Image (cartoon, grey):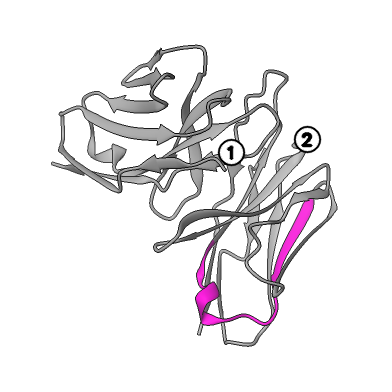
Amino acid sequence: DAGVIQSPRHEVTEMGQEVTLRCKPISGHDYLFWYRQTMMRGLELLIYFNNNVPIDDSGMPEDRFSAKMPNASFSTLKIQPSEPRDSAVYFCASSLIGTGGLDEQFFGPGTRLTVL
Amino acid sequence: GEDVEQSLFLSVREGDSSVINCTYTDSSSTYLYWYKQEPGAGLQLLTYIFSNMDMKQDQRLTVLLNKKDKHLSLRIADTQTGDSAIYFCAEGNAGNMLTFGGGTRLMVKP
């Protein structure tokens, strides 16, 4: 398996533009997570899905952020309109929780977003 | 809610042992985890410990869990320059999401 795939790896955009980040989880995993990492706030959970259904989006910072998971193999995180404070590395992770509750999350390589 | 705390930074010399500490608040945690993040990459699971254990050893890694004090530590023996990374402690319940600490940046000096 290729692991969690994210695209693009780097995105530079101007304030006010729409940004779409993409994620392909590991096949067979039933949980998908979106995280944001910055120097100031560390690693923050934005939203997670179970079987394509959003479970907890309390970490989504504002209405400008939205996430979808139309099927088990694809998810998007959209920022519209983008602002300079959205600059961060965005990670997607997926997992398959074992019967004993062990939750190994597999992280993608991240998308480094810069909003000018 | 749950909270996981770690010190921000640790510097050691190559060949020394490193000890990274973590405290957590959720007494119902089922598993506790250590993830490693190398520069420019995502997090990767390094090791984990089940909450009814107090120690786990895996080659150069030793995880100690003090459930009474809600304290978790990761010891790396014979630390190498390749161990330089950010180490995240995380706790989780069965079926729930993980709560990550802020990460400890380990710098290994040659």
Give the magenta part as a residue range.
A74-89
Secondary structure under tag 2 reads loop
- Can residue A79 be found in the magenta stretch? yes
Q: Is residue B69 left or right of residue A71?
A: left
Which residue corresponds to the image point at 83% horizontal and 42% vertical from the top-left?
Answer: A51
Secondary structure under tag 1 reads strand
Amino acid identity at mark 1: Leu
Q: Position of residue B10 (x, y in %)?
A: 23, 43
Write down the quadrant of residue A50 in the picture: top right
Classify 10 Å Cα crowding around label 2: few (below 14), some (14-19), many (20 and above).
Answer: few
Which residue corresponds to the image point at 26% horizontal and 30% vertical from the top-left?
Answer: B19
Q: Position of residue B88 (x, y in %)?
A: 42, 40
Residue B98, disc: 1
Q: Which residue is mark 2?
A: A28
Quadrant assignment for the N terminus of chain B: top right
Which residue corresponds to the image point at 49% horizontal and 44% vertical from the top-left?
Answer: B43
Q: Position of residue A81 (x, y in %)?
A: 67, 82
Residue A8, disc: none
Q: Chain of mark 2?
A: A
Quadrant assignment for the C terminus of chain B: top left
**Towards the viewer: A74 or A56:** A56
Amino acid identity at mark 2: Gly
